[in-house]
Image (spheres, grey):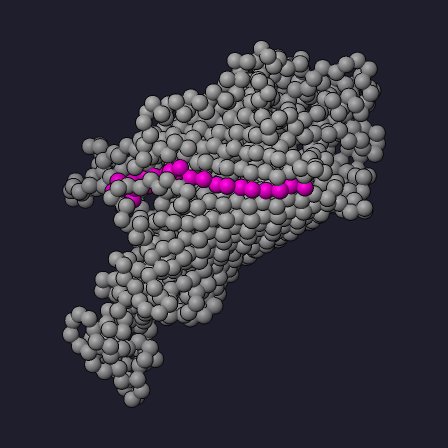
Amino acid sequence: MTRLPHLFTASALSLALLATPLFAHAQAADAVAPASVPLGRALASFASQQGVALAFDPGLTAGRTAPVLAPDQPLEAGFAQLLAGTGLRVTRRADGSYTLERAAAGRMPALRVGADAGSTFLPAQLPFGQGQRLDQEALQAQVKGNGDIATALRGNPAVQFSDSARSSRTMGEIRPADFSINGAPFYQNLFLLDGASINNDIDPTYTAQTIANVNSAVDVPSAAQGIAVDVDLLESLTVYDANVPAAYGGFTGGVIDAQSRKAGDALHGKVWMRMARSAWDQVITNPTQAESYEESATFAYQPAYDKLRLGARLEGRTRGGIGVIGTLSHTRSDIPLRAYANGQSTSGNDVNRRTQLRENTAATVALDWSSGEGLDLTASLSYAPNDDRYFIMNTKDSWFDIRSGGPTAKLGATWQQGAWTFRNSLNYSDLESSRRSEGDTMKNWRPSKEFNWGIGSTSSIGNWGSVDQNDRRIGYRLGIDRDAFTLGNSTHTVQFGAGVQRRDASYERPNDQYIYQGGVATRSCTLADGSIDTVSCSLSPLLTGTGTGQYLSQLFIYHAGAFEVSGTEYEAWVQDSIALGRWTLRPGLRLDRNDLFGQTDLSPRLALSWDVLGDERTLLNAGVNRYYGRSFFSYLLREGRERLRESKTRSRASTAWEDVTGTWNVATNRLRDLDSPYTDEWTLGIDQQFEHLQVHAKYVDRSTRRDVLRRKVGDPLDTTLYNRNTYEYTNDGRSDAQTWTLSLGSVRPLEAWGMQNSWQLSADYTDVARNYNDYEDTVDLTQLVRYEGELMYRYQLPATDYLRPWSVRLSTRTAVPVAGLTWNNFFRVQAGFEGTVTGASEIIDGLSVPTLTRRTYPRTWTWDSNVEYRLPLPRAQEAYARVEVMNVLNRSNQTSGTTAGNTYYEPGRSFWLELGYVF
């Protein structure tokens, strides 16, 4: 393990902090901002002075300030000055009134990484303590790594990651990491791309992180994020983690709403290249794993990799006002490994060196058009397939591909008529989690002169066959917004809507798959009819044991077959934002109906905000809400797919397989009615703004009930359909979580010596108690164990994953505009946590009780950084170079493990290089 001397570490950290906004605060006297007032109040006052009607959502202006206007400003110039640098604009309606909205992407500098001088390039807080929003400048400012959503959310204090997700062992992977929001299961987040769900709900807990999952004969790994969204394609990324509006349903964690870029008003483009290489890395592993790591024959240890991402984008607008933007990016990771352990190899093209591949392609085309009189039309099409190529260790001819992702499309029409806005959308997606193999057999021979590549007692050849899994959706959604109107002393902003969605999920094995095993010595391969068995018998002399050759005595046939489940989902919601003096109350109600699982759910939502002093600088917020989670297709598809297997056994080499009566597999899972899991939440928070500083503190309390888990049941009545060890999904899961978060940061960049400095510091404390790990958890959590000498049930043990009790995160940005340089830093300190180690069992009252002891893992801290240089070129063109460094000080951060085999470390010092050209 590599460690730097303490003195050097401290000095390097001190040097980094010296150039951050903390230093700039000391120079604040040299950069005093002009007098400012809350933006909402400034707009309302200016509109009143001009004698015009202005209606807007208070959430757009919350936490923003505006300069004090000089007297007698013209209408348009005044609005422009108040909104400079906010990304907002005022538009005039047909009835002569005005409204406030976010500026279209085309009115911002097209395809630029930079923003205006007033931007802090940091996440913006949402009203009512709902969460955070990252615009495209904030997304580009941080270390992007693989460019996925999870990496973009590392600074969010409500987000926690699995300790094994980002490991020094598997740096070649490009799939997005899973994450938990406010202590909820990672698979209960809702992912949206341009308003359409991109969750893959086939079986999101069955991930590709383990060898057993990838090399399964029956199952294919799935993922919670059905599409690996590239943040380079996004205009914004919004995370709702509490007080979530009624328009969103189908989660007990949080909502991640990604919005794609829209075309600008002129012809612009961008090309870029990113790359990372293991040759640039400092590898940190357990010393006892060093040889296994270097000689690895499995993707669980990746000693070498090369990643390359290429991207191009072109946008423009026709004379008829149609905006068109097209983007194409392709990421590829080459992971060279040994094919066989212990240096074993075969002749020909099966030498002991193979390269696994990970590939992701993201192609998008989006169009938009506005009539200028209230009608806006949009259309978008995305195709984002993943293709991960694997082989089975120690197995000849064993290549297979795991394919995921797929197409998504959306048609949208927004119509503004007077005070009403009607938003229509038609969405479609077809996401897969499939496997493609090169053959339809797997044979496990005993080592012989012909089959001489085996490790141990087996020489294997072939693979597990092909499987197709799809999750298809098509749906329509209508949202209606009413401009603010006055009723007595209160102002109301009403929103309501409804939607319907058809869903189809399928599991298909397109052809029969044959798996032979159980080699038995034989001197003949002649069948009873006189023919020769060349498929499952060989007379090649065995290397050990007696007999001339061998025949395979067991055959498992996975028959071709398909299973499909379909259903319709309905939704309806209503919400009213009521402003009464300094108080804003937002009651809402949501209805969800799912005929696939027969579930009807009613979700009340209530959020409250109090402007304590009436100047929008001190806002207290609170909320009481209920959220209903999703159910997954694996509950319904498991029973059918398990019955596709037929088993045959023969005791003589002369017996043909056609003459053997097979035994069909029976299901190990029984269906029963399930209710939707739900979470009851209450929150309390404060948003405080000072002259140069904004502070946000929040407490979230969540109680989750009726969550789904898998439990063993007694002997089934019909053993022709069910195995005696039968399980069923139940609603016995429950959890309680309390999360405290605090964030503070600069309101606007602070200038000192030609540098613009911004910063944001966040901290969190989380306490979670849960009686399950995920919905596939078959461990009896009511089992008695002895933990640290105390007798308790398993569900009383401390949680171990997605749960660091506390963390502190600091993001900083220093820009030197005159030199074209920017420097971004991300510091994170995470608490250690407690795991368990299983020891010998003891007998208590006739029961065998496992003995568990505490294993404490150390706290970790990491510093990530990136530096970017931009070179202006003629005709508003730019070239840029960007270097990202993760774990700058190369710290050894252990994240889990009680033995050498399961010890994980965060990646050591590693690099990304990006080069690009913008025009």
Residue at x-position 43% and y-position 30% = 863
Residue 111: % across, % down = 65, 39
Residue 847: % across, % down = 19, 44
Extreme bottom residue here? Answer: 530
User: Can residue 564 be seen in this snapshot?
Assistant: yes
Picture quadrant of residue 874: top right
Which quadrant holds the N terminus?
top left
Q: How many circles with numbers are drawn on the protein?
A: 0
Picture quadrant of residue 648: bottom left
Picture quadrant of residue 415: top right
266 left or right of 94 in image: left
Residue at x-position 36% and y-position 55% = 337
Q: Is residue 428 above or below residue 664?
A: above
User: Can residue 635 be seen in this snapshot?
Assistant: no
Residue at x-position 31% and y-position 67% = 346
Residue 491: % across, % down = 71, 24
224 left or right of 420 in image: left
Q: Nearer the viewer, residue 773 or 764?
A: 764
> Would you say residue 807 sits in the magenta stretch?
no
- Residue stretch rendered in magenta on the structure: 896-919
Q: Nearer the viewer, residue 72 or 346?
A: 346
Residue at x-position 25% and y-position 34% = 854
74 left or right of 391 in image: right
Q: Is residue 265 above or below residue 447?
A: above
